[in-house]
Amino acid sequence: MQAKLSIKVRLVLLSLLAVLGTAIVTALFYTSNRTTERALVEVYEQNGESLLRMQRIENLLLELRFRAAGLLLDQLPIQGSHNHLKDARQELAQLWSELQANAGTLFDSKAASAEMQALRSDWPQVEATLGQLDQGYTVRDNPRLTEVLEEQWPLMVKAAVKPLQTLIPLARERSGEAFGSAKASSQRMLQIGVTVAALCLLLLAGMAWFTMRAILAPLAEVKQAKRRIADGDLAAPMPKFQVP
């Protein structure tokens, strides 16, 4: 290789190798960062927000049960509880709509998919129970409110709260898996990038060494010939040195 390639070609190869190595390493690090970014987006915008929605739905239903029981015990005013119910129903409708539309891959597992399907099927029970609670508040009918809490509310808990309590830990697990998978992929890309960078450095070092040798070896011959001439050997041949 040393005899066949001119110094100019060597320098060109060095430059090309440096540019190619830099481009490959940059692309690998960019891909790694994008992988991590996509994972964070999935965990936060889809899994994380869906998890928060489910927790909020569960909390709202518990708050409604607490306020209705407090009203029957004459500990809370009926108007405040009724207003809270109206606001909660609107928020629940929005949360439920967003949960179904933006869940992403959160419910891909068999267990989560089954629980989510059951929750979809039984969600009308939630709306019906809250409607009965609203009617009880409207007519200020404590016996009706008692009936709702004692008879209908347990059915709604079974239809909605229990599936939510099952889905929430599954959602946490799925979020952890998504982030862990992306993190592992990012680490692999970083390892490949480091390996490629090391190989490029080795190739650059090798090319630089051969190029320096191609330049310095003739110079050393010229220096040696000049020394022989200085010592009185006028017949010593002067090597021809020309940078290709």
Image (cartoon, rainbow, N blue to C red):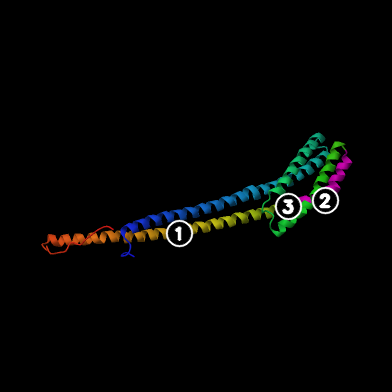
Query: Which residue lies at the image location 74% right of the left edge and 41% below the top edge?
Result: 91
Q: Secondary structure at mark 1?
A: helix
Mark 2 and mark 1: Cα distance apart in space:
61 Å
Q: Nearer the viewer, residue 58 or 212?
A: 212
Q: Earlier in the sequence, mark 1 or mark 3?
A: 3
Query: Which residue lies at the image location 54% right of the left edge and 55% below the top edge?
Result: 186
Residue 204 point in image, percent of width and height: 38, 58
Q: Amino acid at mark 3?
A: Gln
Q: Earlier in the sequence, mark 3 or mark 2?
A: 2
* Residue where numbered disc 3 is placed: 165
Q: Amino acid at mark 1?
A: Val
Residue 203 point in image, percent of width and height: 39, 60
The answer to whether the residue labelled 2 contacts the one labelled 1, judged by CB atoms less than 8 Å apart, is: no
The answer to whether the residue labelled 1 contacts the one labelled 3, judged by CB atoms less than 8 Å apart, is: no
By secondary structure, the bulk of the magenta-drawn segment is best described as helix
Nearer to us of marks 1 and 3 is 1
Mark 1 and mark 3: Cα distance apart in space:
47 Å
Mark 3 and mark 2: Cα distance apart in space:
15 Å
* Residue where numbered disc 2 is placed: 155
Q: Quadrant of residue 133?
A: top right
Q: Is residue 39 above or below residue 76?
A: below
Q: Secondary structure at mark 2?
A: helix
Q: Earlier in the sequence, mark 2 or mark 1?
A: 2
Q: Nearer the viewer, residue 72 or 173?
A: 173
Q: Amino acid at mark 2?
A: Leu
Residue range in magenta is 141-164
* Residue where numbered disc 1 is placed: 196
Residue 119 point in image, percent of width and height: 76, 52
Identify the image quadrant of the C terminus: bottom left
Q: Quadrant of residue 132?
A: top right
On the picture, is 237 further left or further right than 83? left
Q: Secondary structure at mark 3?
A: helix
